[in-house]
Image (tube, grey):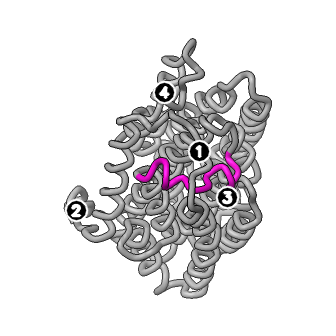
Amino acid sequence: IVITLLIFFLGGFAFSNHRSHQSELYSLMLFSLIGGIVLFGFQNLVTLFLGIEILSIPLYVLAGSNKTDLRSNEASIKYFLMGAFATGFLLFGIALVYGSSSSFDLYTIHQFSVENPKNMMFTMGAVLMLAALAFKVSMAPFHMWSPDVYQGSPSLITTFMMSTVKISAFYAFFKMMSIGFFGISSEWLNIIGVFIIITLFLANVMGLAQSNVKRMLAYSSVSHVGYLALIFFGLNSLSAYNLAFYLFAYSLATIGVMMCLIYVEKLKRETSFNAFKGLVHSEPIIAVTAAVSMLSMAGIPLTAGFMGKFGIFAQAIQETPFLVVVAILGSAISIAYYLRLIMIMFFPKESSLKTSEKVSLTYNIVAVVVLVAIITLGIFPDLFAKQFGI
């Protein structure tokens, strides 16, 4: 809810060319948010399905809301077709799980998985649901839709998908696998381990190869799913807190970078790296916020992103040190493409944005809020822990 509220504050400038139907865009984002809240509270597979559909269907419309842009149209149809395909996998998985456990209730399924770890139909249902949920969070090799959809969608909608939607979908993924299928974790943990390796190397290497900032950030978003998925290893009483902290820190950083991209895209009509040249000279506040946000994404100390990664890596290293090493290597690769954008924004002597149109006061306030939150949570992570009673 907090992340969505921050995104709404960016809407006036971002949606200025959607004047005729701006209220509908906010309404659809709120519908999607409701689906996300349902995903946090589900205890029943039918509720899980409804939550995912309430979350996803408005996004198919939002992705194509820039009707005059062919990339936006392509993003909408691609997301819709592949999303419907993944939903088929989810429903097939739910049917097999229900057929073997005779229940839709999450905790009854948990009990069945503990008592019947070798039930083949139940295991197949779990694997199908794993594949569908991996698609929803854009984990490789089910990530192929996300770079095209994230690039083609209006930038504010991309911000919403990369933050609020990812928070909701990943929490549902975590809850389903760690509670519902806990008894057969030996069957699916190795699959997730392979997915993590593919995700981290593929997304970070592809991120290095991009010449478009929006597409680079799309691959960056995919790579963060790889770090997040380490939460399944070494589960303990702090796992939900570690996941929540990382998701919140990552979402703040996403807003910090994307608000900068929205401003540049609006003025330059493009999102290539050169469009950001010397941005710090014309808009120092959003340039600094974007730089600190990317350092947080890379996991540099004294940022919220570092504390988020540290919590998840510290939990996972006891069970799978190899995957943690892979994740650290992935983080090291990601620093290269984040620094590339930071250097382009800061080191040219003059800005390429020769315009009288300045960032609004609202944007500067949101930028300062994000900047302060990222640094404060990086230095005092206990402030977040108090919300959990830890």
* Distance CA(mark 4)–CA(mark 2): 30 Å
Q: Within 10 angstroms of label 4, few (less than 14), some, or many (20 or more) residues?
A: some
Secondary structure beneath label 2: helix
Q: Earlier in the sequence, mark 4 or mark 2?
A: 4
Q: Earlier in the sequence, mark 4 or mark 3?
A: 4
Count of number-bearing discs:
4
Q: Earlier in the sequence, mark 1 or mark 4?
A: 4
User: Could you tell me the amino acid type at mark 4?
Assistant: Phe
* Residue 383: assigned label: 2
Q: Quadrant of residue 30?
A: top left
Q: Magenta part of the protein: which range?
A: 271-284
* Residue 219: assigned label: 3
User: Residue 217, image x and y in percent?
Assistant: 62, 55
Task: Tell me, yes or no, whether the highlighted magenta stretch contains residue 194.
Answer: no
* Distance CA(mark 1)–CA(mark 2): 38 Å
In the picture of the structure, the residue carrying the numbered disc 4 is 31
* Distance CA(mark 3)–CA(mark 2): 30 Å
* Distance CA(mark 1)–CA(mark 4): 36 Å
* Distance CA(mark 4)–CA(mark 3): 26 Å
User: Could you tell me the amino acid type at mark 2?
Assistant: Leu
User: Could you tell me the amino acid type at mark 3?
Assistant: Tyr
User: Could you tell me the amino acid type at mark 1?
Assistant: Leu
Task: Tell me, yes or no, whether the highlighted magenta stretch contains residue 282.
Answer: yes
In which quadrant will I find the N terminus? top left
In which quadrant will I find the C terminus? bottom left
